[in-house]
Amino acid sequence: MNPYIHITQGNGGKQTQELIHNVFLKYLNHNNFQLEDSAKVFIENQKIAITTDAHVIKPIFFSGGDIGKLAITGTINDLSVVGAKPLFITASFIIEEGFSILNLQKILESMKKELEYNQVEFIAGDTKVVPKGEIDEIFISTTGIGVLLENIPTGLGTVKEKDKVILSGTMGDHGASLYLLRNSLDFNVDIKSDCNSINFVIQNLLSSCKTIKIIRDPTRGGVATVLNEFVRNQNWGIEIWEEKVPIKEEVKGVCDILGLEVFHLACEGRFVCILAEEEVEKAISILKNFEISKDSSVIGEVTNRYPSKVVLKTNIGGKRMLDMLSNEILPRIC
Amino acid sequence: MNPYIHITQGNGGKQTQELIHNVFLKYLNHNNFQLEDSAKVFIENQKIAITTDAHVIKPIFFSGGDIGKLAITGTINDLSVVGAKPLFITASFIIEEGFSILNLQKILESMKKELEYNQVEFIAGDTKVVPKGEIDEIFISTTGIGVLLENIPTGLGTVKEKDKVILSGTMGDHGASLYLLRNSLDFNVDIKSDCNSINFVIQNLLSSCKTIKIIRDPTRGGVATVLNEFVRNQNWGIEIWEEKVPIKEEVKGVCDILGLEVFHLACEGRFVCILAEEEVEKAISILKNFEISKDSSVIGEVTNRYPSKVVLKTNIGGKRMLDMLSNEILPRIC
């Protein structure tokens, strides 16, 4: 086979079939895969969660992952944070004519690995090939289907003063990593993206802690954006304690030098949650059991002093507002 | 609001929220819409069908539809042909910086209209904005979720000699329409795409006819490609009778002049099905009741004379093989 994607491989005919059989099905497959217009599956629990995302990250390979891993983890994480157990994933691939088949295989291998790790089935796909210059390399859109667990977050309406805010790991690794790569900055540091599935850690958390009010993964827009989504139109606000926020030295260094707001940097393997004070200790001890959340920390609390606001108590004792991201730090971060 | 998509509207922060609230939610919304990472839905029937497609059609507006209508009908049709009733749709939008918000609204309006007509709920979305030049205008990836009806097609394994092949309407209108537009050919004809949902007609057909073996919509690759997928590795083949195949005069004219194989032209609102001879009359009378399938016709039959082959009996009495599409007539046809 030609080592580069050919325009005929998007024709829906013979060459598309060959591409599907010789490349895609070697990675994305399962026992009862039927090449039909729709996949048929059986779901026992009737409460379903569904999420969708387009992945346009640039570059497609980065330290700690690639667009394939990101597409799967991103989808799994969106299901996990609402309290769903991910079951199925679909993906549509839009590929530029001339794209390397070897790179496509690397991406598919990453997807396969991440699907297996999470015990999630790939059930349906689609591939379009677009003439050279009409798309930059490859975009992957994924949809995830899961079943809601018995205990799901109780919702923003149940949040109370003194509830605590937990961040599950270091902040902004993904954003800082991509920022360095994209700007070819030579800081002599390798910042690895935190790109990871947070499925199992959240399942454990939800099965043990009954006072989890809300969970969200701070991707585009970062932790500050997620926190501002929480407080919007609420008569409560959130105070964040800078000294408690886990940030890698390298990430802090990059932000300081470049003037980036670390609270706006994207994470791809972290979550923020609000829960009652009495379960904080238990929650943290569960999180510390998992490698991906070993740096988890209580970073702040719910307060009635600043309705609808997120306020940062800084290391030097001052206070400042943390707003949503309102410019574009870096397009195609995910 | 600025009349063109700005790069900050893909930041996941304030501008993305504004775009979602001021544009997307005006069209794609439902009663219990919660802006969470996943939508939560309840599905009574546990046998689920799921399909996914990327839509990259060019131009995005064409005679008879646009990329928005196509994204919805394409997804609904893929669910319909396996015997599922479409319930939910998700969509992820990848948009070029500078894209006209007015055009985005037109596209969303088309999606809304088609969703309402089919009584399908839009439940989850995602929007990415890509810098100018890194994507051509807009791509929409959709996933559809449906429940399997009581009677679904019995499968290729149940096909027998003398079974009949039905095409639900005129062939190749979509492909010919796009071909004219893309090549700026002035034939003094307006060929309208057949882009339409075939949901209700198929539901009617399946509830009345119990011998439907297989249904498929002949999109990319056209009728010849679908028929070849049917016969692959089978000990039976299909004979098609040219004189019975409904083709618009204008479509035939365009194909003759340009040397296009009309059997390879895409349809976006037609289906091909195989069923037992004894139910043909009933099936055709049901199809004739619907505007979109009023030109339906029995175009051929299953035969053991040509195992794994599709043979066309031409108007002048000759016979020739109909192969799968194996070149690229027109990239970005859907």
Image (cartoon, coloured by chain):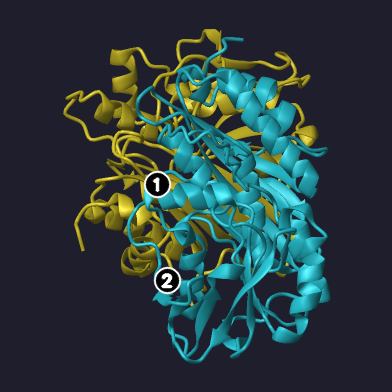
Chain colours: A yellow, B cyan
Q: Position of residue B110 (x, y in %)?
A: 68, 34
Q: Residue at x 33, y 46 (%)?
A: A66
Q: Nearer the viewer, mark 2 or mark 1?
A: 2
Q: Secondary structure at mark 2?
A: loop
Q: Amino acid at mark 2?
A: Leu
Amino acid type, residue under disc 1 in the picture: Leu
Task: Tell me residue A63's x, y (percent).
Answer: 27, 41
Residue A240, image x and y in percent?
57, 22
Classify mark 2: residues with Cα within 10 Å, few (<14), some (14-19) or many (20+).
Answer: many
Q: Residue furthest front?
A: B316
Any mark on residue A169, and which?
A: none
* Residue at which label 1 appears: B330
- The chain identifier of the residue carrying mark 2 reads B
Compared across the picture, whether A206 is left or right of A21 comes to right
* Front-most of residues A333 and A102: A102
Q: Residues within 10 Å of mark 1 (few under 14, many from 20)?
A: many
Left or right of A251 on screen, residue B182: right
Towards the viewer: B249 or A236? B249
Instruction: Note whether A223 is above or below B45 in the view shown.
Output: above
Q: Position of residue B132 (x, y in %)?
A: 38, 22
Q: Earlier in the sequence, mark 2 or mark 1?
A: 2
**The disc label shown at residue B322, or none:** 2
- Image vertical order of residue A141 relative to residue B286, above or below: above
